[in-house]
Image: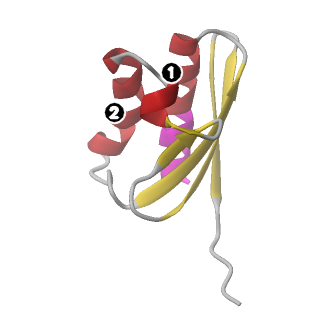
Amino acid sequence: MVITPQIHGTGRRKKAVARVFLKKGTGHITVNGKAYHEYFMTDTMRAAIIKPLSAAACLKDYDFTITVAGGGLPGQAGAAGLGISRALLA
């Protein structure tokens, strides 16, 4: 049995908190059980999620499982982006 390590990152913005779990994969991003493009409806919010991945040039290298709570959707998107950045640094 091979255990793949998960890396954790937490992001906060205003009242929103995002917990991000990163593992090697193919680029799938789920937020609260949905694909990120279904959860975040606007291009601006989707860009906040993708921005750290495109800056690190690892858009298709990792899978992310994100849970967000509190605040509104724009705050949750910002918190998720920060959580992704912190997980990538770890």
Name which residue lies at 33% across and 57% down: 60
- The span shown in magenta is 82-90
Identify which amino acid the numbered label 2 is placed on. Lys
Counting from the top left corner in percent of width and height, residue 46 is at: 38, 26
Q: Is residue 27 above or below residue 79?
A: below
For the N terminus, give its image quadrant: bottom right
Q: Is residue 13 above or below residue 28?
A: above
Badge count: 2
Name which residue lies at 57% across and 24% down: 79
Counting from the top left corner in percent of width and height, residue 85 is at: 48, 40
Q: Which residue is mark 1?
A: 78
Q: Is residue 18 above or below residue 8?
A: above
For the C terminus, give its image quadrant: bottom right
Asked if residue 36 is among those painted magenta in the image, a careful observer would answer no
Identify which amino acid the numbered label 1 is placed on. Gly
Q: Which numbered circle lies on residue 51?
A: 2
Counting from the top left corner in percent of width and height, residue 22 is at: 56, 55
First reached walking from the N terminus: tag 2 or tag 1: 2
- At label 1, counting other C-alpha atoms closer than 10 Å, the crowd grade (few under 14, some 14-19, many 20 or more) is many
Name which residue lies at 34% across and 26% down: 47
Indicate the quadrant where residue 11 lies.
top right
Q: Secondary structure at mark 2?
A: helix
Q: Residue furthest bottom?
A: 1
